[in-house]
Amino acid sequence: MNPTLRKTLRWSLFAVVIATIGVIIWHTTRPVPVEIVIRPVETGQVEKIVANTRAGTVEACRRAKLSPSIGGQIARLPVKEGDSVTAGQLLLELWNDDLVAQTALAESEVTSAESRAKSACLQAEVAQREADRQIKLRRSGSASEEQADKTITRAQSLQAECKATRAAVETSRARVGVAKANLDRTRLTAPFNGIIAQINGELSEFVTPSPIGIPTPPAVDIVDVSCFYVTAPIDEVDAAVIDTGLPASISLDAFGDRHFSGRVRRIAPFVLDREKQARTVDVEVEFTRPEDFKHLLAGYSADVEIVLDARKNTLRIPTHAILDGKRVFVYLPDRSVIRERSIQTGLSNWEYTEVVSGLKPGEQVVVNVDRSGIADGAPAVVMKETP
């Protein structure tokens, strides 16, 4: 082979080797694009909210746990759990035959007293007419003074007896009231329209009132299902900015992602310090749509988000895309890189933050900012699926 050709081939081979090594070095040292998830800067509503620190509870606006004020044996139990009842309906009655008899006796005594009073008052009227005649006769000289005095005295005596018997009637009526009051103590009636939630007792069983300081289960638990509200603990710092009437959103674990509209109806006038490091104020939020009550049960766990302020048709981005409250990473698709940018924010909540300045509609911000490799000027590739 020609020496010149051999030398040329040698240099060509050397150049190929050098180029290959250069390509390998470039591939191994060039920056690897970071995978990013992006979201557009969009126009929408942003709300400033406060939420409960622990799970709240759905409460019925009216709930009564009833027990007789005296002990006794259950004689009537005309309702069962789950029944709908109306105000005044009998729920439970203890054995009270003795009290029924006492009431009947007291009522008969009233009748007897009324008859005696009627008789005494009729006699008093007759005696008064006779006394009036004797006074006229005495003035004309046809009757003696002694006879007139006796007639007048008798009339006055019968008038006093009439008043006494009428007072006896009122006393008898008062006895009837006492007897009926004792009888009513053996009966439980519904204080309002509602549903029987629980009954503790059966026919012929004995029930006793709770001793002082020792609570016992109620005989009948009745719930008004026409109105519900949520009581939720709010951090004492957040509670200071809450007012009654503010709108709220209510979510319940039992209903998944569904949200119910509500309104703050009451703020507790004191701070709970059950946990010394997390003091809270109980806030009550009522449901504002009666159609929601059909599916609610007292005792459900619930969370509330109280809306303090709102901005409509404002620029917003996902809150978790913001670093230190003022920085974001913007994706530049024409260069496939991300750039850090400072922004000014407004209202904010867990989901969205208002952008006052620093971004334009349609720009793309990186939301997985905690991913390794996220930095100003870093090459990036957009993930096809969100994490």
Image (cartoon, helix red, strand yellow):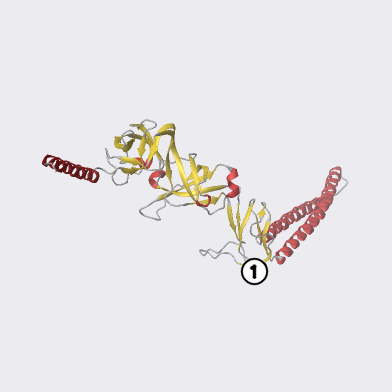
| 101 vs 128, nearest the viewer | 101
The secondary element bearing badge 1 is classed as: loop
Which residue is more in the foreground, 236 or 83?
83
Quadrant of res 27: top left
Q: Amino acid at mark 1?
A: Glu
Tell me the crowding category of disc 1: few under 14, some 14 to 19, or many 20 or more residues within 10 angstroms, Cα based. Answer: few
The residue sitting at the left extreme is 3
Q: Residue 315 appears at what percent x and percent y?
A: 40, 32
Q: Is residue 256 left or right of residue 322?
A: right
Res. 178 image quadrant:
bottom right
Image coordinates for residue 229, horizontal then vertical, percent = 53, 47
Q: In the rendering, at what x and y percent does residue 127 appear?
A: 83, 51
Could you tell me which residue is drawn at 71 percent across and 57 percent down?
A: 171
Say whether residue 32 is left or right of residue 171. Answer: left
Q: Classify 151 as above or below 262.
A: below
What is the residue that sits farthest to the right in this orientation? Answer: 142
Q: Is residue 329 above or below residue 204?
A: above
Per the image, the residue denoted by label 1 is 205
Front-most of residues 175 and 348: 348
